[in-house]
Image (cartoon, rainbow, N blue to C red):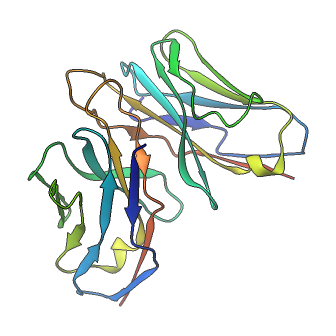
Amino acid sequence: GDSVTQMEGPVTLSEEAFLTINCTYTATGYPSLFWYVQYPGEGLQLLLKATKADDKGSNKGFEATYRKETTSFHLEKGSVQVSDSAVYFCALSPNSGYSTLTFGKGTMLLVSP
Amino acid sequence: GAGVSQSPSNKVTEKGKDVELRCDPISGHTALYWYRQSLGQGLEFLIYFQGNSAPDKSGLPSDRFSAERTGGSVSTLTIQRTQQEDSAVYLCASTLKIGGGMSDTQYFGPGTRLTVL
């Protein structure tokens, strides 16, 4: 079945540092890929998505590129802020039928001033 | 409403009691999903509705769990004879449509935190 693997956290960075959170997936066909973010005490919010190979999703300074050859969708940001502290979830859904999400286990990011 | 709403936001119950969790999707969204977020298991799919029917119930962990959707809108997830391992955050999500070969973005509610004592 489909699966998503994320790097384990917590990831601890200083403000303005470069962020990478690795995500790889296993799926049949060509899924859509997502990054969701969960801020402390809040629900899941879509951060960005990509629906086909080589697409780049971007939002709020975060980027991720759909790499079919490496089955990866790594999340990057050039300069993190304290307000980026949250749990980040990589997810996929098949591009056929309905779109149930398969999530990774989440990576906690802690950014200190 | 503007977003997916869920109620109650928190529910504490005793082992063996039944609970009902409610989800009100974004108006006009035809597809509705329930997920569970727990410490040990991460985020797990429970059930999917298209309109009022549930073509995929494969994620429901046992026959103590059931869900229904009426009028193509509000959905209720019912857990009978709750157990401590049912303690989790139950999340609901909705999407505008399905099909067309593309996955549609799911919009999540804030969740219901269930604690079974």
Report the residue that reaches farthest toward the top. B71
Looking at the image, residue A7 sits to the left or right of residue B54; the answer is left
Looking at the image, residue B114 sits to the left or right of residue B51; the answer is right
Report the residue that reaches farthest toward the left. A54
Q: Position of residue B111 (x, y in %)?
A: 57, 45
Residue found at x 30% / y 40%: A28
Q: Nearer the viewer, residue A17 or B40?
A: B40
Q: Position of residue B113 (x, y in %)?
A: 67, 49
Looking at the image, residue B44 sits to the left or right of residue B32; the answer is right
The quarter of the displayed image where residue A15 is located: bottom left
The quarter of the displayed image where residue B94 is located: top left
Residue found at x 30% / y 22%: B98
Q: Position of residue A14 (x, y in %)?
A: 32, 90
Q: Nearer the viewer, residue A57 or B20?
A: A57
Q: Quick check: B98 above or below A38?
A: above
Looking at the image, residue B78 sits to the left or right of residue A102; the answer is right
Residue found at x 26% / y 21%: B99
The quarter of the displayed image where residue B1 is located: top left
Q: Quick check: B104 above or below B96?
A: below
